[in-house]
Image (cartoon, grey):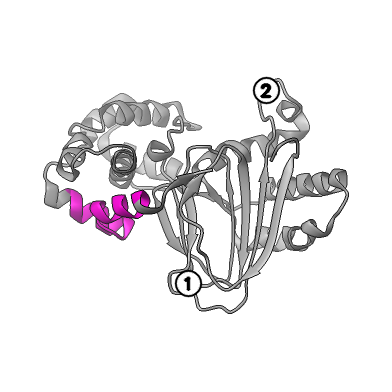
Amino acid sequence: MGKDVLYIADRHKKEFTYPIHNHEVYELNFVEHAQGVRRIVGDNTEVIGEYDLVLITSPDLEHVWEQNTCTSPDIHEVTIQFDLDMSESGMFGRNPFNSMKHMMQEARKGLAFPMSAILRVYNDLVSLSSVTDGFYAFTKFLTILYELSRCDGARTLATSSYAKVDIESDSRRILKVKNYITKNYMDEIRLGTLSDIAGMSPSAFSRFFKLHTGRRLSDYIIDHRLGYASRLLVDTTKSIAEIGYECGFNNLSNFNRIFKKKKGCSPSEFRENYHKTRIIV
């Protein structure tokens, strides 16, 4: 990007060919008329509909949009890469930008926006590349980010354990439990132990955890383990069995079964998909 704050690529095409990659700069990627495309962000894989908008703010988070079953003759993609200082000491650490800063932190795991948010910024997104003055293009882009930061329904994509993002929670009890799981995910984790940490009965804690996180405790633990396992599959040459045991799965067949159920592919297929095409830009 050099000295430019924004890099904008607005293109119409028939297929996605770019391999899985990661990069230092932040990225907002919008795609329309691409139903059936497979989107991979970290250890999350989804098949998208007609419209898709994702923000990624981690230099280590791999991502790609793959053709998959999409047969659209006119895919429209707008990719905006940008470099902003979101530190506390910078301009964006100040009060007017609080919602944007929170969104940027969430987007370290990849952040997918709902249709209501896409409609809110659609006109600005598709016209951004036609703004020739760099200052006005930047202010228009800031408006897009601000509007997205005020929308409800955005959801993170990669697991915290895969994206290497610190665990956060609005509840001290939940945070204590999550930290315990992070430190002990490779061992057997009992509900009684976690409920004792939270100072609640097992049944009350299970309800409390679901209320605060929107997920069952067992699903959270499995996803946390799979996030670490996925990271090891990408970053190391350890065997599948070794990774499964290291991440708390008691046997190889159990690891393979749960991984395929959650990720849509086997651990070996996941590793192969990343290794054969992964580039860093």
Q: Nearer the viewer, residue 173 or 81?
A: 81
* Residue depicted at x 82% and y 59%: 130
For the residue carrying disc 2, how many other residues have a C-alpha within 10 Å: few (<14), some (14-19), or many (20+)? Answer: few
Q: What x and y, as percent, mark residue 77? A: 63, 63
> Which badge, 2 or 1, comes first in the chain's sequence?
1
Viewer-nearest of discs 2 and 1: 1
Quadrant (top left/top right/bottom left/bottom right) for the N terminus: top right
Stretch in magenta: 255-275
Q: How many numbered tags mark residues here?
A: 2
Secondary structure of the residue carrying tag 1 is: loop
Classify residue 130 as left or right of residue 168. right
Q: Amino acid at mark 1?
A: Gly
- Label of residue 88 in the image: 2
Q: What x and y, as percent, mark residue 137? A: 82, 49
Q: Amino acid at mark 2?
A: Glu
Q: CA distance from mark 2 to mark 1?
A: 40 Å
Q: Nearer the viewer, residue 154 or 198?
A: 154
* Residue depicted at x 62% and y 36%: 102
- Label of residue 36 in the image: 1
Quadrant (top left/top right/bottom left/bottom right) for the C terminus: top right
* Residue depicted at x 47% and y 68%: 67
Secondary structure of the residue carrying tag 2 is: loop
